[in-house]
């Protein structure tokens, strides 16, 4: 039995997933990603391999610990990848985006894929049917939009999304909710429409922390998978270890 620990250190949360014999068995949010917590995970799951995608300044002793106890790999542009890239500065591609692209190349080979990652920022990542990453777009995520309107105005409150938000807001709170949520929905649908006009058939994939919230509200047929990034990490772990 082979167990792989996959770590995703994002701007908002530190997450982990456990794969056993190629199947995802559990995922969870880390408390703080400190050395003691990592030691506890190693003792609990006894992993053979581990992989880390990080977009933050994390404690480097974590890498030493994982290297000592597992076949460890840290995702970067120098990793062995199951796709190529045509962007001008590949070294600036975030580890999280590399993992999403690896998942698309692994799960949907020979397809044009637009992977939409819903995180602190929304990333649009296009990889063509020849497994070449052409680039994409980055825009503010949902919580960032709510926070920006609060931080950069004198009186607008800080609000959160609501499952039952109206299209037409009837007070300040619901106006803010409608503007952010439906603004993101229109943005996603607009990008899908523009890519469709340029490339014809392609596979739109929605993933990340707010996947379920937005997937049910989009009019376009879309593949939604909360675990897409972890599947990409596992694919990269197998390729690099």
Image (spheres, helix red, strand yellow):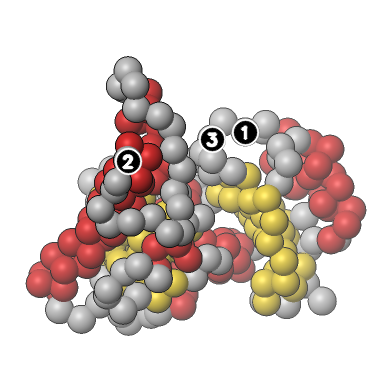
Residue to which mark 1 is pinned? 58
Discs 3, 1 touching: Cβ within 8 Å: yes
Callout 2 secondary element: loop
Of the pair 58 and 49, the residue shown nearer to us: 58
Q: Quadrant of the N terminus?
A: bottom right
Q: Earlier in the sequence, mark 1 or mark 2?
A: 1
Callout 1 secondary element: loop
Discs 1, 2 touching: Cβ within 8 Å: no
Residue to which mark 3 is pinned? 56
- The circle on residue 34 is none
| Residue 193 x/y as whole percent | 16, 68
| Residue 20 x/y as whole percent | 74, 73
At label 3, counting other C-alpha atoms closer than 10 Å, the crowd grade (few under 14, some 14-19, many 20 or more) is few
The answer to whether residue 185 of the structure is visible from this angle is: yes
Q: CA distance from mark 3 to mark 1?
A: 6 Å
- The circle on residue 171 is 2
Q: CA distance from mark 1 to mark 2?
A: 41 Å
Q: Quadrant of residue 174?
A: top left
């Amino acid at each position: 039995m082979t167990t792989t620990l996959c770590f995703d250190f994002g701007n908002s949360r530190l997450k982990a997933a456990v794969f056993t014999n190629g199947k995802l068995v559990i995922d969870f949010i880390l408390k703080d990603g400190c050395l003691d917590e990592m030691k506890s995970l190693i003792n609990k799951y006894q992993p053979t391999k581990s992989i880390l995608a990080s977009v933050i300044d994390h404690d480097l002793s974590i890498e030493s610990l994982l290297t000592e106890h597992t076949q460890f790999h840290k995702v970067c542009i120098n990793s062995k990848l199951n796709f190529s890239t045509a962007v001008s500065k590949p070294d600036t591609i975030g580890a999280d985006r590399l993992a999403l692209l690896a998942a698309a190349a692994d799960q949907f080979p020979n397809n044009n894929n637009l992977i939409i990652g819903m995180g602190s920022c929304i990333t649009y990542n296009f990889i063509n049917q020849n497994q070449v990453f052409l680039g994409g777009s980055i825009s503010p995520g949902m919580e960032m939009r709510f926070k920006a309107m609060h931080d950069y105005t004198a009186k607008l409150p800080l609000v959160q999304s609501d499952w039952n938000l109206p299209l037409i807001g009837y007070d300040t709170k619901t106006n803010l909710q409608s503007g952010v949520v439906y603004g993101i929905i229109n943005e996603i649908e607009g990008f899908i429409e523009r890519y469709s006009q340029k490339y014809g058939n392609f596979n739109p994939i929605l993933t990340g922390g707010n996947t379920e919230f937005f997937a049910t509200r989009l009019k376009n047929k879309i593949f939604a998978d909360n675990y897409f990034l972890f599947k990409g990490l596992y694919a990269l772990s197998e390729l690099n270890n």
